[in-house]
């Protein structure tokens, strides 16, 4: 007889492992199946985020930021660095150590919360007697059974048609985090989150970086006042960003990669680079899941179809994270995982997509929540806007990083905060206050009347709120 579980979670990334832990906390007998392997063939829980995404990229961004500061900015503080050198192998080793710490942390959490873990690939076998049989193909193949199934299989990097990733010259986010030496010339196709972050890492370490973007606008999903400020900062740093291009033939040779493209002025161009990062989005991962065995519904993009509560077309089968609709963000997946576990328990788990924050961890960082000015104009929604520049913030001056601003948008009649957009130092941390304010349907005046520590970067948020009513105190 196969092993029986109340809940089986397929996938051990942010959506999956968090769902498993929460379900166990709620009293269920839970299994989680994940096949990710580390370099030694062992388990590596955490999915794309922990292994080749959020965590290692932040480790590399931090390392490259330190190198950039030591190379160009320490002197402003009276600190002279002589004989500065770069050990890429050690930097990559530190990144790998950070990843392993996170992998091991999830293993510990599974043991603490009594989640049964299978290091294997999972696939549907059949629906039977009010439950689902799941094949577990690892070192030993077996079949287990679960009353509820949560699919959290994540996503894969999308390759350009006819140009597969070899992870040597043509790189996904995986290969971009494993480049063994600083390339002299680096090309990036796509100016989204991954393209900008990886481009920034290798630009700081000494590469000449060119980013090719097909859209005519930079960061089209971002409030355009914020996007223009970011574009100006990145260009000043040395990132070459070309918008409105049409990429043609890509040739991958022993000496590098050649990219033919037509620029926005309709001129034929060729970009010769040592390495090429392709970051044109991601696709839902259902490889090997065998959804047809039980009739699990997929959409035209291959994503699992779910309703507003993450229910699929099958009873007691749920799906969360990158494999379903909505933004492909680790924290969105986590919140969906918690919500589904609570719904299984008869509770009312909830995810508010209107207050999911977005962050791009470049320097300056970019973060936002809610609607941007362009969206409000398109919707005909009357609003008020307030901005405050970090150049007028005392803590930013002391940090030596005064790039950017905080921008707040509020309803013209009720003053309820509709969106907050930040480009500048530690925007990823500053946005949390704004998310909380919007969750509690705060007004800009609420933020303006809250005492913020001085000197702190968060004062810029307060001043932006004051600016909504045109009454800033420090600008």
Image (cartoon, helix red, strand yellow):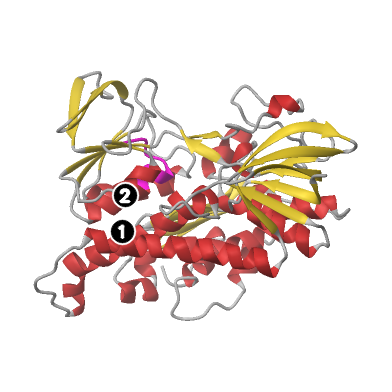
Distance between the Cα atoms at labels 2 and 1?
7 Å
Residue 24: image tag = none
Looking at the rendered structure, the number of numbered marks drawn on it comes to 2
Labels 2 & 1 near each other (Cβ < 8 A):
yes
Depth check: 409 or 424 in front? 424
Reading the image, the residue beneath label 1 is: 92
Q: Secondary structure at mark 1?
A: helix
The verdict on residue 366 being magenta is no
Residue at mark 2: 178
Q: Is residue 282 above or below residue 102?
A: above
**Quick check: 445 above or below 132?**
below
Q: Which residues are magenta?
A: 188-196
> Which residue sits at x=15%, y=45%?
184
Using the rendered view, name the quadrant where residue 45 is placed.
bottom right
Q: Residue furthest left?
A: 83
Q: Position of residue 4 (x, y in %)?
A: 82, 49
Quick check: 373 left or right of 80?
right
């Amino acid at each position: 007889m196969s092993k029986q579980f109340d809940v089986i979670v397929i996938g051990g990334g942010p959506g999956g492992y968090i769902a498993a832990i929460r379900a166990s906390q709620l009293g269920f007998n839970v299994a989680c199946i994940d096949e990710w392997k580390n370099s030694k063939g062992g388990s590596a829980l955490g999915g794309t985020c922990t292994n080749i995404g959020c965590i290692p990229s932040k480790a590399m961004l931090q390392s490259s930021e330190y190198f950039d500061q030591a190379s160009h900015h320490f002197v402003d503080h009276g600190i002279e660095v002589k004989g500065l050198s770069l050990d890429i192998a050690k930097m990559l080793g530190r990144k790998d150590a950070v990843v392993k710490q996170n992998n091991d942390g999830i293993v510990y959490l599974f043991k603490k919360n009594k989640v049964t873990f299978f290091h294997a690939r999972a696939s549907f076998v059949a629906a039977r007697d009010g439950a689902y049989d799941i094949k577990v193909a690892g070192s030993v193949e077996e079949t287990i059974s679960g009353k509820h199934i949560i699919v959290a299989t994540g996503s894969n990097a999308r390759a350009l048609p006819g140009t597969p990733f070899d992870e040597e010259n043509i790189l996904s986010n995986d290969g971009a985090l494993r480049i063994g030496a600083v390339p002299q010339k680096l090309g990036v196709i796509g100016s989204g989150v991954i393209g900008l972050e990886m481009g920034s890492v290798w630009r700081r370490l000494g590469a000449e970086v060119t980013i090719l973007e097909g859209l005519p606008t930079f960061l089209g999903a971002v409030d355009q006042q914020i996007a223009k400020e970011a574009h100006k900062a990145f260009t000043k740093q040395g990132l070459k960003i070309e918008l409105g291009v049409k990429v043609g033939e890509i040739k991958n040779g022993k000496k590098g990669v050649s990219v033919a493209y037509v620029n926005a002025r309709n001129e034929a161009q060729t970009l010769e680079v040592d390495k090429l990062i392709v970051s044109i989005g991601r696709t839902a991962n259902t490889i090997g899941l065998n959804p047809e065995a039980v009739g699990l519904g997929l959409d035209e993009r291959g994503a699992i179809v779910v309703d507003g509560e993450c229910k699929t077309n099958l009873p007691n089968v749920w799906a969360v994270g990158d494999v379903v609709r909505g933004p492909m963000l680790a924290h969105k997946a986590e919140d969906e995982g918690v919500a589904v576990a609570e719904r299984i328990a008869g509770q009312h788990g909830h995810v508010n997509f209107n207050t999911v924050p977005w962050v791009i961890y470049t320097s300056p960082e970019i973060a936002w929540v809610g609607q941007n000015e362009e969206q409000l104009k398109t919707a005909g929604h009357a609003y008020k806007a307030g901005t405050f520049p970090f150049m007028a913030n005392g803590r930013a001056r002391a940090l030596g990083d005064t790039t950017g601003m905080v921008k707040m948008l509020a309803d013209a009649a009720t003053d309820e905060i509709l969106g907050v957009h930040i480009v500048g130092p530690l925007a990823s941390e500053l946005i949390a206050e704004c998310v909380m304010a919007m969750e509690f349907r705060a007004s800009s005046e609420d933020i303006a009347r809250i005492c913020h520590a001085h000197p702190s970067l968060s004062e810029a948020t307060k001043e932006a709120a004051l600016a909504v009513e045109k009454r800033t105190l420090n600008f």
